[in-house]
Amino acid sequence: MSKSLIAVPIGDPAGVGPEIVAKSVAAKEVFDAANCVVVGDRTIMENAIKISGVSLSVNVIEGPEDGDFREGVLNLIDLGNVDMAKFEFGKVNGMCGQAAYQYIAKSIELANEGRVDAVATTPINKESLRAGNINFIGHTEIFGALTGTEDPLTMFETNGMRVFFLTRHVSLREMLDMIKKDRIIDYVKRCTEALEKLGVKDGTMAIAGLNPHSGEHGLFGWEEVNEITPAIEELQKEGYKVVGPVGADSVFHQAAIGKYNSVLSLYHDQGHIATKTLDFEKTIAITNGMPILRTSVDHGTAFDIAGKGIVSAVSMIEAILLAAKYAPNFVS
């Protein structure tokens, strides 16, 4: 059985991205599961290999077709876009923001062209993007724009528990205004399609409650009564396997032990806290609803430890393994 071909952009060069890429490519479980094409800067990656203390030789290639996928070889598409005279670990830098964007854009281009099976991304820094005049707030927005996807879906997976997000980067006050019947119906339908695309066709999705005890029929809030329950009832009439609202203090545990195939979290921290408490390092973001597959670590650039060789690569390894697991479902 052939291995999936995964593009791996190195992220912000001033962060830990290059180090976790080096450690991951050197890991036996990654070598056994996937062929990786790293997109980055040669000098940065050679330094990262030395800093990380792994045994890898860099093979510069023009495209995935040129890869030498033997153990101990890091196949690199070298964009040569970092001026080392202006480079410093752990600092916001517009040059690094631009470089990080270019690595992502190249990886998406390869996936759009069908030359790789998926993309597994590393951390970028929002301030560096802004300093580099890159007008995107993060990975999801970049992937949406470069794949022509209007509203990509974010799903977290950790130890088999899957969590979608109805709202993400908005204030709690704004989030409350977005808890609407029509939005929930739309998201459940698209999340169901995303799960089917990943090969998850059995089981039931649970909708998390918003208020304590899911509002207790209006005692602690009316969102469940007016918006959430009517949405669930309509979806059930249409044949969707969905239940809820299930109290947020129990729904994630129930999903973790296999009662539900996924949970629709209603806001950012509700789902983030649940997944990261279960297993912080193995919480992986999967961007769904696009024509290509993207997985990602869900930690930041860790500027405070960048360049020290001490960063854990567990999350990056898991992101590549999940990309390899789901990629066959995206290959036509």
Image (cartoon, helix red, strand yellow):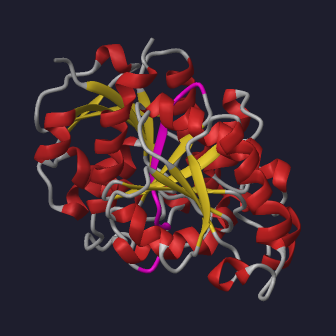
Magenta residues?
A: 291-304
For the C terminus, the image quarter is top left
Q: Is residue 41 left or right of residue 3?
A: right
Magenta span contains residue 301: yes
For the N terminus, the image quarter is top left
Q: Position of residue 61 (x, y in %)?
A: 34, 23
Query: Could you say which quadrant of the image residue 75 lies in?
Result: top left
Q: Is residue 9 left or right of residue 55?
A: right
Q: Residue at x 81, y 81 (%)?
A: 218
Magenta span contains residue 66: no
Q: Is residue 313 left or right of residue 265?
A: left
Q: Residue at x 48, y 15 (%)?
A: 114
| Relative vertical location of residue 16 with respect to residue 110 in this rendering, above or below | below
Please indicate, yes or no, whether residue 261 appears anywhere in the rendered image.
yes
Query: Could you say which quadrant of the image residue 268 lies in?
Result: bottom right
Q: Is residue 155 left or right of residue 283?
A: right
Nearer to us in this view, 5 or 321: 321
Query: Could you say which quadrant of the image residue 226 lies in?
Result: bottom right
Give the number of callouts: 0
